[in-house]
Amino acid sequence: MKTAKMEQILVIDDDVELCSLVSEYLQAEGFAVECVHDGERGLQKATAGGYMLTVLDVMLPGINGFEVLRRIRATSRLPVLLLTARGEDVDRIVGLEIGADDYLPKPFNPRELVARIRAVLRRTRSDGKPANPAPEILRVGEVELDPATRTVRNEGKPVDLTSVEFNLLEVLLREAGHVVPRERLVNAVLSRKFSPFDRSIDMHVSKVRKKLGDTESDEHIKTVRGVGYIFARPREKVKSTS
């Protein structure tokens, strides 16, 4: 009888004691864990393949976490959970802009780390694994999203999105012409409860806007202040007037 293969998690952090604690906790939760304590070796491991997710600390000797993340994103969509210093909003914002799937400030409760990892894996698990008949392709104006192949095109040109960005755009496209509250986006895309002080969903929206080429006068995704976001249907796009 075959046993299920354990999901491999790569932890890149120079805090050996923390790595030991995290490994022990994740292994008890059914994950296989490998720890690396510097950015160079961590990058080599992350880009070699075989891991379901990487937990990456910002503060690393040699190559820092941001640079490791940049280089990972140059060649891979490997899910990355970034560890940041508590209260360092800049670290969180930069990490999300570069392409982190989620972040967790230090110090953290190991239970929350497990919850965040499981949430990220749920969002990425369907990549390349369509189990049911292929879902219909979503088209709104020139934007086309194919849930089966997890690809996006705008005006016929491919748009490279991270897993979180893809899921975010899919939710907005399915509700095109209707406002989607920030709380619902956080629940659906980040798989966690909404907090008014958590701006990560706004950062992800900003990244999707840039990749779709949004401008002030021609926006695909509009902000409804105090409520959420709306993907505008072509006839709803309003050109600015001077």
Image: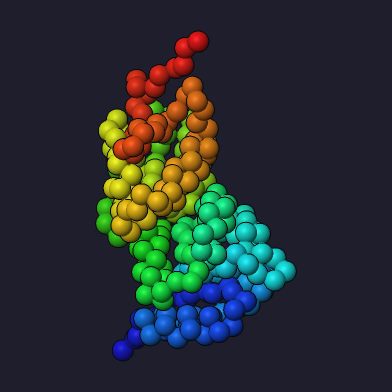
Quadrant in the picture for residue 175: top left
Q: Nearer the viewer, residue 174 or 50?
A: 174
Viewer-proximal residue among 108 and 25: 108
Q: Is residue 194 left or right of residue 157?
A: left
Image position of 84 with respect to 212: above or below:
below
Look at 54% across and 74% down and name the residue there.
Answer: 11
The answer to whether residue 30 is above or below residue 72 is: below
Task: Inspect this view and state whether residue 44 appears.
Answer: no
Q: Where is residue 35 in the image (x, y as percent from the top left)?
A: 56, 79
Q: Is residue 193 left or right of residue 14?
A: left
Given residues 32 and 4, the one toward you in this image is 32
User: Residue at image x 38%, y 85%?
Assistant: 28
Residue 186 point in image, percent of width and height? 34, 51
Q: Is residue 108 visible?
A: yes
> x, y (%) of residue 241?
47, 12
Rendered view: 237 above or below 242 = below
